[in-house]
Each structure stands twice: as C-alpha cells, then as structure tokens.
C-alpha cells in the first residue's frame, strides 16, 4: 500500500507541475481534466497542443481509472510515447504484452495497434504524440 501512495504522490507532483518555456510558464493545476471522448474512465490534461506547436507535437497527462482500458486502436499518423508515472497496468503494443510500472517508457509508431489496461491502482501516464494528436 505504501508503494501505491508514494506513486500517487509522484503523480500529484506532475499534476501540480508546470511547463516552462522561454518567457512563458503554464501551471498544470490550472488545466482542466477532460474526459476521453471514447474510453470510459480515461481523462486527459492537455499540457501543450497542436495549436501551440504548429501541429508538430502534443503532450498530455493521462489518468486511467482502476481496471479501465484504452481499448485497441491505432493512430494513422502519430508516433505515441508513454512514460509511466504511477500505478500499474499492461500495454499491448503491436501484439506484445508489456507490463507498465513507474519508470517504464513505451513507444508506439504510427499505424501500430495498441491498448492500455490499468491495474487495480489505476494508471498515470505522460503521453506524447508526434505530430500532435490535438
């Protein structure tokens, strides 16, 4: 149990962090959580979007509720990366089962099917898309 609490503390540090750019800072706590339009129990906080990057990349905090999933899907044009911040789960990346735990990074090239299933603690990711997802 203590390990789960420590992991959630780490996620809260991210959730209360900020994006720093020359002449600009954006506090994550000021950004809303958005329900995923397709997957129940999945929320996203859009850190930097296509509008701000000219479409080149986007960054998102992702919160997946316990035992919920981002079901199998592909991105036609985006490379996607996941950096696991807290919680646990499994990613099926191009048919391979990858255990997700804090400190794990996974990469899904464009057109590669993938899915993420959160464990009993939920799962907290820092996701990046190139080019931007939104």
Image (spheres, rainbow, N blue to C red):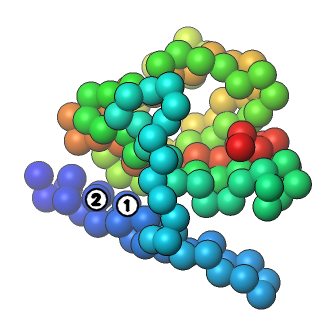
Tell me where residue 129 appears, x and y as whole percent: 71, 43
Distance from the alpha carbon under mark 2 to that under mark 1: 5 Å
Any part of residue 4 in sight: yes
Q: What kind of element bears circle 1? A: helix
* Crowdedness near tag 2: few (<14), some (14–19) or many (≥20) residues, C-alpha within 10 Å: some
Q: Residue furthest left?
A: 1
Tell me where residue 44 appears, x and y as whole percent: 50, 47
Residue at image point 73% right, 28% down: 109
The residue labelled by disc 1 is: 11
Residue 63's tag is: none
Any part of residue 88 in sight: no
The residue labelled by disc 2 is: 8
Q: Residue furthest bottom?
A: 23
In the rendered structure, are the residues bearing label 2 and label 1 in contact, judged by CB atoms less than 8 Å apart?
yes
- Say whether residue 113 is left or right of residue 17: right
Tell me where residue 104 appears, x and y as whole percent: 48, 45
- Say whether residue 94 is left or right of residue 37: right
Q: Is 93 rendered above or below residue 82?
A: above
Please name whichever residue, 30 or 58, is drawn nearer the observer in this view of the structure. 30
Tell me where residue 40 appears, x and y as whole percent: 38, 28
Q: What kind of element bears circle 2? A: helix
In what quadrant of the picture does the C terminus appear? top right
């Amino acid at each position: 149990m203590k390990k789960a609490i420590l992991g959630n503390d780490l996620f809260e540090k991210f959730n209360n962090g900020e994006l720093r750019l020359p002449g600009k800072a954006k506090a994550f706590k000021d950004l809303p959580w958005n329900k995923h339009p397709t997957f129940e129990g999945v929320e996203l906080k859009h850190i930097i979007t296509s509008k701000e990057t000219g479409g080149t990349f986007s960054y998102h905090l992702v919160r997946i509720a316990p035992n919920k999933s981002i079901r199998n899907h592909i991105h036609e044009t985006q490379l996607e990366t996941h950096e696991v911040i807290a919680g646990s789960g499994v990613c099926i990346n191009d048919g391979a089962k990858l255990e997700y735990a804090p400190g794990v990074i996974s990469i899904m090239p464009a057109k590669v099917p993938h899915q993420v299933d959160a464990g009993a603690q939920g799962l907290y990711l820092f996701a990046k898309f190139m080019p931007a997802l939104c």
